[in-house]
Image: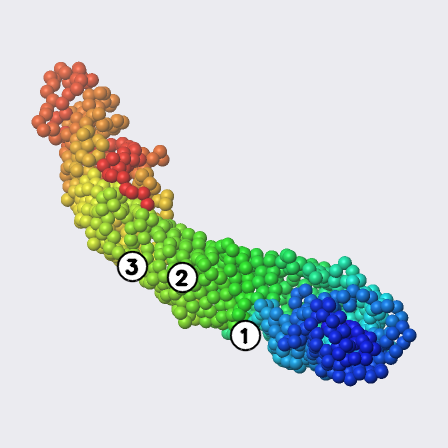
Amino acid sequence: MLLRLLAVASVVVLVLGALTWLNRRSLAREALTGWLESRGVATRAVVEELGPSTFTARLSLGDPRNPDFEAQQVDVRYRARLSGLEVVSVTLRKPVLRARLTPAGVKMGSLDPLVAEILSRPPKPGAKVPRIRIDDGVLVLRTDYGPMRVTADALVDDGQLKTLTATSAPARLRGRDFDVAMGAGALTEVTRSGRAEVAFSAPVSRATAAGATLSDARLTFTAQLPYPDVQARRGEGAVVANLTAVGARADVASQSLETAEFRVGFTGQSRGWLNDLAVRGQMAGSFTAGSGRFGEARAEAIRAAITSKDLTWTRAGGDRVAGVVTLSAAAQVFRAADLRLSDFVVAATGPVSATANGGKAELTGSVVGRGAWSGMGAPVAGDAGSVLALKRAARGFRIAAPEVGLTASYDRRQPPSWSLAMREPVRLVSDSGAQLLMTSPQRVSLSGGGLPKVDLTISRLQLGGAPSADVALAVSGLSAGPAVNARLGAAGRVAMAGGGITFTASRCADFAVQRLEFGANDIEAISGRLCPAGGPLFAMRGGAWRVSGRAERVAGAAAFVQGRVVGGAGRVQASGSGPNMTATLHANTARLEDTAPETRFNPILMSGDVTLREFIWRADLAFTRPDAGRLGTALVTHDGRLGFGVAVIETETLTFAEGGLQPVQISPLASSVGSPAVGQARFTGRFDWAPEGSTSSGKVIIPGLDFQSPAGPVRGLKGEIAFESLAPLKAAPGQELTVAEVQSMVLLTGLRARFELADNLLKVEGGEASVGGGRIRAETLEVPLAPGAPTRGVIYVEGVQLHDLVEASPFGDKVDLDAKVSGRIPFEMTGNKVRISGGFLKADQPGRLSISREALTGVSADTPTTLPSEANPNDTFTDFAYQAMENLAFDTLDVTVASKDDGRLGMLFHIVGRHDPPTKQRIRLTVLELIQRKFLGQKLPLPSGTGVNLTLDTTLNLDDLMADWGEFQKARTPQAPQP
């Protein structure tokens, strides 16, 4: 701008000097104005003084109301030469140039054609250039962003700018993307021995551009440069330059620096001209800041340095800067949320390059420092396992990255890209012995120091004010709180913002826990997955954490209640800080299964709400059958500090009906309660636990129940069963159930039994029932709950009439028995197979027995009579035996009962009595028939009153009989719904 002004002034002065020979001011003025106006420049010139070697004039160029250039006084010194006038010097006093800055360059209105004409003429070789001085010059520059005003004093001698002193007025420049408010700036230039010394200084009160803001800053620039040789079009020589920027505050997005200072110096050589100018040399820079904020992170005592021994700037083929640089940066303290780094030093070296369209850097560096993280708070009483190890590891650690490669590139037509390469692993070694190892920018592992093993894969890492990354996480051996040996697998995005950290899962996180420790009441084999539910799955800030998601496929087992949960699903929300924790869990559904050795109940469905407040767990649960029928509720309370808890369980009054709910659908223990069962039952129970163990109790209340049993229909079962323990199942002794009647082979009425349940064994004591005018009583009866185990017992029979029992048996049409007996029958029963050993029955009074001949096989009888007999009886006497059993009135009857090896039931009868047919019988024989014994081999009537001493040994296929009876019961009983 200044050179253009001086060129125009010089031409105008030369024209004025040539016209002084006209010796008339008016002619000189007219000639000057005519020459300028011929070039389109409106001119006003007033020649005030004119002498042989000097003249003085006033000059105005352009619109008279707002001239593009004007000078209040122009002093010209000249001398005459044979070749014409030679201007020696020109002094412009208080000149004013008005111009406009546009994207195409500086425009000076009406002077633009004249300037183009002058600049297009190269100076003549050896031509003498006048000395030009400007005193109190003013440049008024209009721009699209605001006006600027510059005052300057300058001296040009022999075509070189010898001195320049310029001051810019305070200005504010505003555009769409920037806003700069500057104070008064100063520029000086001095040329000595072909070198120019330049100094510039300007305050910036506030400047914003591209989201960055600089406040209360001062820029200072000094340089020693070769003065350009315009004729030779060369600018070669030594270059020494220094730039200093000092600012009270600088802000970029969410990052800021306070009391920052930047210094850079360059020493080198330049060559070439404007279009191929190249500068090469050494550069050294430094940066310091009292403090800085980077998002939520803060740093103190920041220091950085940059050097290059071979930095080159060239304009050939486009502006380009390239060189090998060495960088170093350090911060005394760096804090990001709960992370604190101290003595943190970063160093790197490598080639960098930049053009107008972008840049590239390939650096190899190292990082060292110490750190500490307090995100989980200080260790406190109650911390255990991995939590305590993590807190200890985070209290202090060393950082060492000995060799890290960074490649970064930027092209304004594409998004920036960068990559990291770990030429040696990066280590974080804790004072506690834990170690974090990064083998690549994508692979991180953690182990040692009592910590769980962690494998982390990182991708899409973004650094800056809010660092974030996609991660895949695998954790094993984690112990936290009551959880022992937990495993976790998750994937998602980790982000740091607002002083905290969040994890937003991209898929469900799988977890498994070996056990939750609660003293003697551990929960074991916990597993499932936690799925995202519209927000971060995990968040932590300032030591406070939060988990929010949807649980699926949750399973766990509680040995102390002999149960497990599978298929759990619902919403989970939990938060905490230090030892304090709150949680809300809503279980949409879960399947509760029995794990007792002998199943107590069939699987049921569970739903409800679980909360944790001030270390107290509370649960309000509802239970339903798989067919959606309601069963009951449970209220659970657990004190997490003391380890005490209670669960109160209560069913609704369960109504059993034909074609509806049946007991076997609820419990396999009710398998003997065959369908159709009609009636009601209800259960109440509770579990109490403490760190040293647990207790349980319960009660089954049966107001009335009719059902089908293996022995036949049962009517009127009533009573209560009180359990001393539910896990294992144990009923208190001395309890009693009653049954109105059992419609078996014979009608049993008034059944009453006292019992207890322990060690999966039902023991009946004092059970009795009325049957056949007498009673049967159980001396002992043990019914195991284990499938396939035998039932054992001893039954006492007291005065029971056998007539109805025989009539109901398969051989009732062949045997008729009127006998009231008592005795003892020990037995063992497995399924439908009954085995009896040492059974004995004896008739309490005389009775009668009638057995048809078709039912008898293998009979041996001792029948003494008053008639003579032969040593070897023939068929006549065998027939007498059959007649005796067809109509036998006995006085005594004994029966020994025992099972055979082949499973058949052996019965040995001993009967003493007499033949007592309905019609009195006698034998009529002649003396000759007796002598000749002709009656032998004939069938003769056995005389009435004949004494009988009978031993009858027979067997019965009791297994087939019991199987047939069972099939008969099934045939007349509707099928029960399957559980």
Residue pictured at 75% horizontal, 60% vertical:
318
Front position in the image: 759 or 101: 101
| 1 or 2: mark nearer the eye | 2
Amino acid, disc 2: Leu
Tell me whether the residue at label 1 lies in contact with that at label 3, contact meaning CB atoms closer than 8 angstroms: no
Please give the count of numbered marks on the rendered protein: 3
- Residue where numbered disc 3 is placed: 650
Q: Which mark is residue 233?
A: none
Q: Residue furthest right?
A: 82
> Mark 1: which secondary structure?
loop
Amino acid, disc 3: Glu
In the rendered view of the protein, which quadrant contains the C terminus?
A: top left
Residue 331 appears in the rendering: no
Residue pictured at 65% horizontal, 62% vertical:
437
Q: Which quadrant holds residue 301? A: bottom right
Label 1 to label 2: alpha-carbon separation: 28 Å
